[in-house]
Image (cartoon, rainbow, N blue to C red):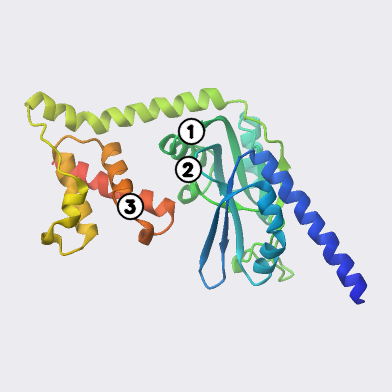
Amino acid sequence: MTEAERKNRGEKSAAIVERVVRAQLRAMACGRFELGIRRAEGEMIVRAGQSGVDIEKAIKWLRHENAKGAHIYIRPDGLHTLSLIDDLSSEAVERMKAAGFEPAVVVETSLNNFQAWLNHGEILDAATSTRAAKQLAERFGGDPSSADWRHFGRLVGFTNPKRERQLPSGMQPFARLRSATGRVYLQAVDFLAAVRASDDGLRRHAEEPRKRSLRKGKLKSVRTLGEFHRDPVYGGDLHRADMAWAKHAAGSGMTLEQIKAELLDGRDLSKKGNSRRQMEYAERTASKAIEQSNM
């Protein structure tokens, strides 16, 4: 192949990537996005606040990173209208469509392995968004560990470098855009109503200890999380301080959601990992504190 032919082929390839990326972003219909670039050695680069134009301008760099083995991901920036269902078969995608859960975007991430983005038609708070994603994953056989309010999905036009996803030829598969309607799924209103109804039930269950405390006259004032962080008894171990405060808060009548919110806002949890891991940490700590307060 001559240099001119190689250059022409590269330009055509770049144009195809730009076109499919633009189609995916348009169908996701978010004002801003977050790009995720996970390099082969494990480093994760996140670019927040990206417009569609910003991402298109970054495609050359993204292709360079991808060629070196990096995974290229996308997700909405901030609260949004979407749920990502990961690790679906083609049969599962068809079942979703038949049941009135037509994806706004379908990406084939490797051979017969799909991700589906569903558009709920309204912006959801983080808790409702996570609960919706988990229920959808359970219903259609998606990956439950990927079901939360801000999980990354693959950006089309780039290869999937996972070794176990290699094609029989030994080549890495491209993430391919299989559909991009952008439409709100038919069952959105009824499904969200059911999600919120189940959420209300869980909230009432979580608030029962507080109600019992109120009935028994045991509701006490709650010390701040910062006081526990500064307490020398914990020797700067903020994990121990978080758990001690959560137990204190639960015993004083605070609800599961209130404890989680305080833990997420009380300090920088970035050492726990990404946003999903931070939420899991807050959920785990609050749930354990509530459980022990009920013993």
- Between residue 271 and residue 286, name the one nearer to us: 271
- Judged from the image, the secondary structure of the residue bearing numbered disc 1 is strand
**Kind of residue at badge 1:** Leu
- Judged from the image, the secondary structure of the residue bearing numbered disc 2 is loop
Q: Earlier in the sequence, mark 2 or mark 3?
A: 2
- Above-or-below relation of 82 to 234: above
Q: Which residue is mark 3?
A: 281
Residue 265 makes an appearance in the image: yes
**Kind of residue at badge 3:** Tyr
Farthest-out residue, left: 217
Q: Give the number of the disc on residue 124.
A: 1
Q: Quadrant of the N terminus?
A: bottom right
Q: Give the number of the disc on residue 149.
A: 2
Q: CA distance from mark 2 to mark 3?
A: 15 Å
Q: Residues within 10 Å of mark 2 (few under 14, many from 20)?
A: many
Q: Earlier in the sequence, mark 2 or mark 1?
A: 1
Q: Residues within 10 Å of mark 1 (few under 14, many from 20)?
A: some
Give yes or no for contact between labels 2 and 1 (Cβ–Cβ under 8 Å): yes
Q: Quadrant of residue 131?
A: top left
